[in-house]
Image (cartoon, rainbow, N blue to C red):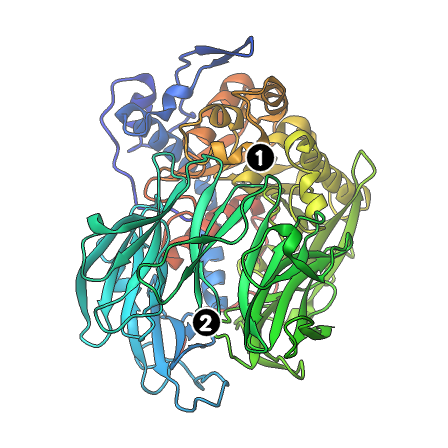
Amino acid sequence: MSPAPEPTTAPATSTATSTATSTASTPTAPPVAPARPVTATHHGRERTDAYDWLRAKDDPEVLGYLEAENAWTEARTSHLADLRAAVFEEIKARTLETDLSVPTRVRGYWYYSRSFEGKQYGASCRVAVTDPADWTPPMPADARPDEPALPGEEVLLDLNELAEGHDFFSLGGSAVSSDDRILAYATDVVGDERYTVRFLDLETREHLADELTDVLGGVTWGTASSGHTGHCYYTTVDETWRPDKVWRHRLGTPQSEDELVLHETDPRFNVGVGRTRSRRYVVAAAGSRTTTEYHLLDAADPAAVPVVFAERSEGVEYSLDHLVVGGQDRFVVLHNATGPEFELGYAAGPAPADGWTPLLPHDLAVRLEDVDAFAGHLVVQQRSEGRTRIRVLTLGDDPDAPVTDDRLLEVGGDLATVGLGGNPAFDQPVVRVGMTSMAQPSSVYDVDLVTSEATLLKRAPVLGGFDSDDYEEHRLWATAPDGTEVPMSLVVRKGVRTSGPVPLVLYGYGAYEASMDPYFSISRLSVLDRGAAFVIAHVRGGGEMGRHWYDDGKMEHKQHTFDDFIACARHLVATGWTTPDRLVAQGGSAGGLLMGAVANQAPEAFGGIVAEVPFVDALTSMLDSSLPLTVGEYDEWGNPEGDAAAYDRIAGYAPYDNVADLPYPPILAITSLNDTRVLYVEPAKWVARIRATAPGADVLLKTEMAAGHGGVSGRYRAWEEIAFSLAWVLDRMGLADRSPIAAPAASPQA
């Protein structure tokens, strides 16, 4: 999240707005949201909500209230202005601003992205492949902002030009047609994730007349493109922002004539579209939280009719890829039909689950997460005991017994995170792998699929004298109330703990089987180098320990997520790592729900809480099936509208419903006006109720007035927002006046 441009105060006629209109002077008290109670009855339970009037996004009174909250937040944090500026400069000084990614080969070109010193956005570029037999990506000795990074560089998109005149800009998907001539790219200039796709002729640099609106993400090309003829696929959303339709577009025709390929009518299911790496099939998928169904289309046929691979079966999730063994078409299927941790199956063509032959049988100790098919190899991403691993299966020529070798790649240590990077070519002899840890910047390798030899291509540069050896990493374990051991990943600068407990940030998420694996962050160094530690609590509801870890932290088991996080906080205090008054909790989105729940359940355990785009009014949102995402979330949280038990369960932990007169620690809530995933009204209501219910609570609300779920756009604005949050965190930990060890000096960059 990062700060938005200075908002314009709206005219107002109420108490809330009269506060907002005084923002020209420094406010001396927080704004007061008028209580306007509305009572609703569900399953015989009455529920009164005094602040749902804040949902009227376009109401001048609501906008005035949000701006008054922004003014109060600015006033309450004005003493941190110098610290914010210092942290921003530290981030900037540690970042190589003019840089480029490691090029990725797609057919006859190497594609890469560039960043430039002094510019908010980057550029998408490519250079031609000079030696088809050489898969070593070209890399410059030095990249300068005013020169091509590589000989023959072709700038496909300059994002700074596209963003000009917009307060917000986001590039969605971008893809080049199969003849490498037409670039389809998607842009969002509001933040609501409804994209417009345009088509650029890379030879003439002119746009085609074609334009697709209200698209989710980007497009997937068919393989029969030639010049201005060709076809592509894309998805659109319904009125609840659910991706429900897959369309086929033919170049040169209006969007109104596009063909509907797949329409999903079950409101629990979303649709998506992609293509197998072999380029043989376009794949249209429909999936809920618990069930999936795939449809195959011939990628070369502009009139292809989708064929179901395996009919949906409630509770069975699967994904697939296409390969060729001994000259025969085959499919690999990753599925949970035989067990929760998934099995890798094998089929000659569309078939139900009982027709999938096991290649890697189900193993309760190993969660199989993804599979990628190449000519001659399958590459599997898996995890066991919380560690991510990459596994390579060598394929022979026998279609009935395809696997001839099975080995794990040795990349990264026990505390590192490894995963596959961009690997678009079916016949590539190497696989791109990424590795990072809490102390190790991201590294990119190419691994030979035959020899397993790993070649380091790039380690993300960190300027200012950074040395990973100055930091230590630990895997810690806390015991939850039910006896479950909960892992944590910790990083701290060496030597800072010699004099006793240290200030500490504890981060958590715990939903959707999303794994918060160890990762490196340049901005985090501003906390570590001032003597604090940073910890990720791998709580249940995430996927770090496998599918069972997720299942044990959702629906009727959701309380485990909160119990785990509180247990982690108390373990860190009990073992001498920190003290409650210097322990700041942080989480966003579903992790923001976690923040709100632990604030209610254990306010004494924390010295501060940062809740970013927090899902804190879960009961209201889950009761309204017209809201974006609600119905599709029933398998994650439950359906409180149709199920009294689900209503009681969510009501028992929803942060907004459980606000009480408690000794809350200071809270910083950050949201975005145009967020379609977690509406701004949730934290706005939450903050208003805390103020009214717990007099004296120090709670701040910061609303980005021109942003979406991911915050405002532009890297410098993002750094400013990060600096805002970090300055508040450092202040809560008592480190606002401490200078960082070996602070990086700002200097001109080549």
Callout 2 crowding tier (Cα within 10 Å): few <14, some 14–19, many ≥20:
some
Which residue corresponds to the image point at 74% horizontal and 64% vertical from the top-left?
414
Pick the quarter of the image with the C terminus.
bottom left
The image shows residue 624 at horizontal and vertical percentages of 44, 24
Residue 345, quarter of picture: bottom right
Report whether 4 appears left or right of 548: left
239 vs 442: above or below: above
In 3D space, how far apart are the residues under numbered discs 2 and 1 (Cα atoms)?
43 Å
**Residue 694 as seen in the image, left or right of residue 115:** right
Residue 96 got which mark? 2
Q: Nearer the viewer, mark 2 or mark 1?
A: 1
User: In front: 749, or 631?
Assistant: 631
The answer to whether residue 666 shows anywhere in this view is: no
Q: Residue at x 38, y 82 (%)?
A: 108
Reading the image, the residue beneath label 1 is 635
For the residue labelled by badge 1, is the local secondary structure a helix, a strand or a loop? helix
